[in-house]
Image: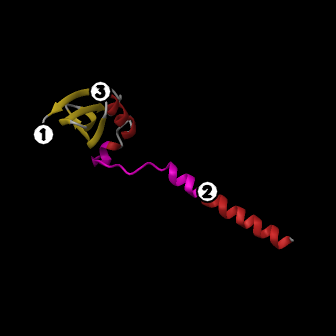
Amino acid sequence: MRNRSITSIFGLLAVLSIVTVGGLAAQQPAARAYKREVPAELLSQTKISEDSARAVALARVAGSAVKTLELEREHGLLIWSFDLTVAGKPGIEEVEVDALTGKIVSVEHEDS
């Protein structure tokens, strides 16, 4: 009887560890499917995360997807620069988000 209890406990622990590891894997962010240029020395200066800036940019251009991302200093500002594509629409929408405030700096359409 004692051996069955120990076996049952170990079986339960094994199942719980598999469920926990599976749950942790599900919480990891998906691999980004776009090109990124994010220098570490600039990243350390941001106050707005890449994920937050991406959400701002995507909300500005409905139905868009990120093609490329750059973190750069431009005109004295530290900006997240997103090139967004929209299905069925030629060219890209460039959306620049201030990396310190999260405000949109500019939005421009660029033809292919």
Q: Mark 3 or mark 2, which has the lower sequence index?
A: 2
Measured Cα–Cα span from mark 1 to mark 2:
47 Å
Q: Residue furthest bottom?
A: 3
Q: Which residue is rendered at x = 19% and y = 29% of the image?
A: 108
Looking at this view, is 91 or 31 the one in front? 91
Residue on which the image places disc 2: 19
Residue on which the image places disc 1: 112
Q: By what rule are the colours in the image chosen?
A: secondary structure
The quadrant of the image that shows the C terminus is: top left
Mark 3 crowdedness (10 Å alpha carbons): few <14, some 14-19, many ≥20: some
Measured Cα–Cα span from mark 1 to mark 3:
23 Å
Tell me the tag on residue 104.
Answer: 3
How many numbered discs? Answer: 3
Q: Which residue is rendered at x = 56% and y = 52% of the image?
A: 23
Q: Position of residue 7 (x, y in %)?
A: 76, 70
Q: Mark 1 or mark 3, which has the lower sequence index?
A: 3
Measured Cα–Cα span from mark 3 to mark 2:
41 Å
Residue type (three-letter) at the residue carrying disc 1: Ser
Residue type (three-letter) at the residue carrying disc 3: Ile
Q: Which residue is rendered at x = 36% and y = 40% of the image?
A: 50
Q: Position of residue 4 (x, y in %)?
A: 81, 70
Q: Nearer the viewer, mark 3 or mark 2?
A: 2
The image quarter containing residue 70 is top left
Q: Secondary structure at mark 3?
A: strand
31 up-or-down from 81: above or below: below
The region drawn magenta spans 21-42
Q: Position of residue 79 (x, y in %)?
A: 27, 35
Residue type (three-letter) at the residue carrying disc 2: Val
Q: Secondary structure at mark 2?
A: helix
Mark 2 crowdedness (10 Å alpha carbons): few <14, some 14-19, many ≥20: few
The quadrant of the image that shows the N terminus is: bottom right
The image quarter containing residue 3 is bottom right
